[in-house]
Image (tube, rainbow, N blue to C red):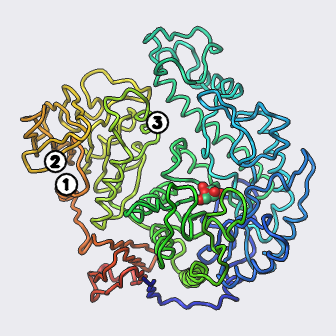
């Protein structure tokens, strides 16, 4: 398969590209560093994690020469270098980093400088063993690896602030510096810590949230199983116990953990803003694959959103999961440009079977991120390690060296991206949103739910996959976000719903929106408490129904509907309260009762699906809801064809990617069809005015 780019911009020579992409950083005099994009960067960012400390000095020269060949204009350095930069507590050695940065700068390559606080040195663990994170089972995690200290450790706060301050003072105004890369993937590989410091900090957090112990007792429902507290000092982290621990306590601990990690980021960010004004600060998210982090909250704190994404190599729909993740990142960024901080040129090393990418997939994956709003494409990592835990991970230069397909594809991609500067800052608009709320996931994933087959993630993937196959670009939104710009809003199993969230959904539908909720939605409030009255609690009025009893199905059991669809996992005993039955159950314990309902509410419509459908069957239901919303599948959608538009003030860029193994003709409203070969990508442009004609 080949990548076929049909672009009309002028490719510059590699030599001029590396330097032409940069101006001097814009220095900000006061306040928070917050620009639209990286200071001084005027082309699509291209590069990767660079770990020169793993290589002898002579390799650095070759690295820089090959980076120029590939059109690399930004590298992330120093992410795990704490032990080398501060070999003994309070003693620093920046010589090697000075050399690397100057070498890169002289070659016109910018740096995204890491703060190395995701890998505290051996001296730190030896001197402060109490800073080790403790698991729910009470195991204090050891060193010799990487990963966060207990986020509430005072010793970690002191040590991490010190190294960040040193780096900021030394490099904060370096002309090569484009971006600060704080820490690495907060929340992974561990998030929660049950250490002594964490328990102490949890109590302080609870006291500031609830003020009185009575308020906490009420919110947590501690009259159940005699869990009443008299004093804050009696409260523990929800460590492993004889039976199920209070779900409201666990939910609060998840919130506390997210908050404690975010405080670590903010502490570093504030030092960098103070000492390195004008340089944006980010930390790399794992948008849809880090369950512990509520990225809606984090997105407000970073200067630009950046993300790491790795294909689930074994899944045939990995390109759809990639699109889901990229759409989530764009949504977190509020539609602004974002940076793909890491992905892989080929196989990773940490999946059960690490499937290598086929020819052309490197470009297709990269351009899919670009299509969905990324203004920079970076990889983990520049040169494949020869030792350590990640030596079997692919890189821009694999063990096979530059004379390899991977490096040739890397160079080709760098060249293509250099010709796409026009796309910088152009945006993607979606008319459909899927509601996504980490608090709801945290709550739903606790023990003793009505069925162990409940799966919000599986359902979101089914809904998203359906829309992807229908050629519909989708955003993700928090239930309390402004939904007014969307024609259709989907809530796959939105278990926890706040008062504000339900009022928001209600207002959206009342004003004319189309809303689709699937089973086990609106079941509890913020404290994992069932609101008074029948389910679906706060969605009852808008959906126009109540549920007498949940009827989860047996493992593998299915039910037939009278419109021929097959449901799985779940059914409800629905009582209609104004909604119309669209389809009923023909078999099973709920035979004769409504399965799919539709309710006119205000100027809008609210649908309820009381069972789970696979992607093919969901198409039947969603196509009707799409009619209500005035939407239709894109012509010739499906067949592995991905088409996304990015718009600037005057131009619409259409990025089409053929993930299939047959050529496809892309129909356009105002031009003859374009034939796209199997595996190919095309980027076409037309003036915005053409829309009006
Ligand atoms: C990321 C991490 C990188 C590298 C990569 C390998 O999660 O940020 O440092 O470990 O995984 O896929």
Number of the front mark, 2 or 3: 2
Which element is circle 1 on?
helix
Could you tell me which secondary element the residue under label 3 belongs to? helix
Residue at 56% from the left image edge and 10% from the top image edge: 229
Task: Single out the mark in the foreground, 1 or 3.
Answer: 1
Left of 457 or right of it: where is 98? right
Q: Alpha-carbon distance for marks 2 and 1?
A: 8 Å
**Quadrant housing residue 36:** bottom right
Q: Which residue is mark 1?
A: 617
Mark carried by residue 152 = none
Label 3 sits on residue: 442
Q: CA distance from mark 2 to mark 3?
A: 29 Å
Label 1: few (<14), some (14–19) or many (≥20) C-alpha neighbours in 10 Å: some
Query: Residue 155's image quarter?
Result: top right
Contact flag, marks 2 and 1 (Cβ < 8 Å): yes
* Mark number displayed over residue 566: 2
């Amino acid at each position: 398969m080949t990548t076929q780019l049909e672009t009309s911009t002028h490719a510059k020579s590699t030599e001029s590209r590396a330097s032409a992409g940069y101006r001097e950083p814009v220095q900000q005099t006061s306040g928070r560093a917050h620009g639209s994009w990286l200071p001084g960067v005027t082309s699509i960012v291209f590069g990767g994690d660079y770990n020169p400390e793993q290589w002898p000095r002579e390799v650095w020269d070759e690295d820089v020469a090959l980076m120029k060949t590939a059109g690399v204009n930004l590298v992330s350095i120093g992410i795990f270098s704490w032990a080398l930069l501060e070999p003994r507590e309070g003693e620093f050695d920046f010589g090697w980093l000075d050399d690397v940065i100057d070498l890169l700068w002289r070659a016109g390559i910018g740096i995204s400088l890491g703060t190395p606080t995701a890998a505290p040195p051996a001296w730190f663990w030896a001197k402060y063993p109490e800073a080790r994170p403790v698991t729910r089972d009470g195991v204090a995690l050891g060193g010799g690896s990487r990963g966060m200290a207990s986020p509430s450790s005072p010793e970690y706060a002191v040590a991490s602030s010190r190294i960040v301050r040193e780096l900021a003072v030394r490099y904060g105004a370096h002309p090569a510096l484009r971006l600060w890369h704080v820490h690495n993937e907060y929340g992974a590989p561990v998030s929660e810590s049950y250490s002594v410091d964490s328990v102490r900090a949890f109590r302080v957090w609870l006291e500031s949230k609830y003020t009185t112990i009575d308020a906490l007792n009420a919110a947590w429902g501690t009259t159940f199983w005699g869990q009443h507290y008299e004093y804050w000092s009696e409260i523990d982290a929800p460590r492993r116990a004889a039976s199920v621990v209070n779900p409201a306590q666990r939910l609060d601990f998840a919130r506390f953990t997210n908050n404690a990690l975010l405080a670590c980021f903010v502490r570093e960010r504030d030092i960098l803003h103070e000492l390195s004004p004008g340089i944006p600060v980010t930390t790399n998210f794992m948008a849809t694959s880090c369950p512990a982090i509520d990225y809606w909250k984090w997105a407000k704190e970073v200067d630009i959103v950046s993300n790491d994404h790795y294909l689930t190599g074994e899944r045939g729909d990995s390109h759809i999961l990639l699109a889901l993740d990229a759409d989530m990142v764009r949504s977190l960024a509020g539609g602004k440009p974002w940076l793909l901080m890491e992905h892989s040129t080929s196989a990773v090393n940490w999946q059960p079977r690490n499937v290598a990418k086929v020819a052309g997939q490197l470009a297709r994956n990269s351009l899919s991120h670009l299509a969905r709003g990324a203004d920079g494409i970076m990889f983990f990592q520049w040169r494949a390690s020869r030792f350590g835990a990640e030596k079997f991970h692919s890189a821009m230069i694999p063990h096979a060296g530059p004379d390899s397909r991977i490096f040739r594809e890397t160079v080709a991609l760098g060249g293509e991206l250099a010709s796409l500067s026009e796309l910088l800052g152009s945006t993607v608009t979606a008319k459909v949103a899927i509601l996504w709320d980490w608090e709801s996931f945290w709550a739903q994933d606790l023990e003793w739910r009505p069925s162990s087959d409940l799966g919000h993630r599986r359902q979101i993937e089914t809904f998203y996959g359906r829309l992807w196959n229908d050629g519909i670009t989708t955003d993700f939104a928090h239930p309390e976000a402004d939904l007014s710009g969307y024609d259709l809003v989907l809530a796959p199993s939105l278990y926890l719903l706040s008062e504000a969230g339900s009022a928001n959904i209600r207002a959206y539908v009342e004003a004319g929106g189309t809303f689709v909720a699937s089973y086990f939605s609106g079941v509890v409030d913020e404290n994992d408490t069932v609101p008074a009255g029948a389910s679906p609690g706060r969605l009852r009025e808008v959906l126009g129904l109540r549920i007498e009893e949940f009827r989860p199905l047996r493992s593998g059991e299915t039910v037939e509907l009278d419109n021929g669809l097959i449901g799985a996992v779940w059914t409800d005993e629905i009582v209609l309260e104004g909604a119309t039955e669209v389809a009923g159950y023909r078999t099973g314990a709920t035979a004769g009762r409504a399965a799919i309902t539709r309710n006119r509410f205000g100027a809008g419509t609210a649908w309820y699906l009381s069972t789970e459908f696979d992607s093919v069957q969901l198409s039947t239901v969603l196509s009707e809801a799409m009619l209500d919303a005035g939407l239709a599948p894109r012509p010739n959608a499906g067949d592995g064809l991905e088409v996304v538009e990015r718009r600037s003030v005057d131009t619409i860029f259409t990025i089409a990617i053929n993930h299939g193994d047959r050529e496809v003709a892309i129909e356009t409203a105002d031009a003859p069809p374009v034939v796209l070969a199997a595996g190919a990508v095309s980027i076409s442009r037309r003036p915005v005015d053409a829309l009006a004609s």
